[in-house]
Amino acid sequence: MKVVLIDDVKTNLMILELMLKKFKGVKSISFEHPVRALEWCKNNHLDLIITDYMMPEIDGIKLSKKLREYKKEDPIPIIMITAHGEEKVKMEALNSGITDFLTKPVNKAEFQARVKNLLKLREYQLKISNRAEWLEEEVKKATIEIENREEEIIFRLSRAAEYRDDDTGHHIKRMAFYSYTIAQALNLDKKFTEMLLKAAPMHDVGKISIPDRILLKPGKLTKEEFEIIKTHTLNGYKILENSNIQLLNLSAEIALTHHEKFNGEGYPYGLKGNNIPISGRICAVADVFDALTSKRPYKEAWSVEKSLNLLKEERGKHFDPDCIDAFFNVLSKILEIKERYKG
Ligand code: C2E
Ligand code: SIN
Ligand code: FE
């Protein structure tokens, strides 16, 4: 513990120093000039100040006010020593941040009791502030941990839902990273962009309700079969809707709207243009590009060139033109992702 002694009379300082000797582990530093004391306090750690009231330049009250200004977050205890006749300043002193008083001539027992109590107070102050810092750290760690777990569980659920036609999980990985990359190219809010990355893998969880004979059918679907396929959007939404987890609300929105088309000819609602949430408009581009370039039970994988031609052709029809432009602006990144999660 570090105690700062301030008195313009040298002999007084010596007496205080002597009385402090009894305290083990306490170091003191003495100042005859309050301005210099303040200067030192500004730049150093200290645990207790014992200051005279009446001094040239700055009195004990002004000194205390200045110190409280410098160390706003740190309520260092301050003892002020007053002489007889200075009693009336005590009220003002308390208001300006003085913690306790001693009266001249300083009584040894009284001095030791005050100092002991205030050092104890200081010890608790430091403990609480360390603990608050420690707790804050722990809460941060725990929050990150929870978020990671949420994401992992969500991703594994998405994989379970996709397992029948995507047993590597690569389709949902590619589709999520494509969506993320398009959102970045559109300069969307960073938090939203990151959430999109985590929510996009769930776009097709509703497929869990589609029977194998339709989902895995090697040939073209009949009209009735396609009507059943369409229900995967609403069914996905029903699985994910009304959550307290923000991420799930976004994935519900994506599940519902990733097959809407910009020209209003999509499903389930035939929403048009900006009535389709931006998440759905982005995921539509990502989903179709991946479907085209991948092998499906009903089709071979298309070449990148042929797939890009379809995206261009459908700009403003199936797809939001801005999302298509963004996609082409970051095409090299898209192709890197395709390479990274191939198969
Ligand atoms: P998916 O295979 O992941 O395809 C997603 C979307 O990519 C399709 O949505 C469509 O917009 C686009 N897409 C995929 N393949 C082609 C294609 O060969 N040509 C064109 N022009 N676009 C293509 P869509 O059509 O709403 O289909 C939703 C899901 O329904 C498909 O997801 C797939 O699981 C299933 N599906 C669609 N058509 C057939 C089919 O003829 N046979 C079978 N077995 N399943 C189909
Ligand atoms: C898939 O078959 O992996 C995707 C189906 C869909 O986009 O609806
Ligand atoms: Fe889908």
Image (cartoon, helix red, strand yellow):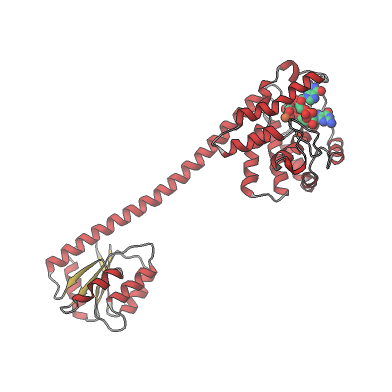
Q: Position of residue 158 (x, y in %)?
A: 63, 29
Is 168 situated left or right of 322 in this image?
left
Quadrant of image for the N terminus: bottom left
247 and 235: which one is in front?
A: 235
Is 144 situated left or right of 299 in this image?
left
Residue at the limit of the structure toward the bottom, as seen here: 56
Q: Is residue 294 visible?
A: no
Quadrant of image for the C terminus: top right
264 and 3: which one is in front?
A: 264
Query: Which residue is painted at 35% across and 65% down in the image?
Result: 45
47 and 91: which one is in front?
A: 91
Q: How many numbered marks does the figure carry? A: 0
Q: Quadrant of residue 274?
A: top right
Please, is residue 319 above or below residue 300 in the view? below
Query: Which residue is painted at 61% across and 31% down in the image?
Result: 240
Q: Is residue 151 visible?
A: yes
Residue at the limit of the structure toward the top, as seen here: 213
Q: Quadrant of residue 36?
A: bottom left
Please, is residue 51 above or below residue 322 in the view? below
54 and 87: which one is in front?
A: 87
Please, is residue 39 above or below residue 158 in the view? below
Please, is residue 78 above or below residue 294 in the view? below
Q: Quadrant of ligand 2?
A: top right
Is 340 situated left or right of 50 in this image?
right
Q: Position of residue 59 (x, y in %)?
A: 28, 79
Query: Which residue is painted at 27% across and 80% down in the image?
Result: 32
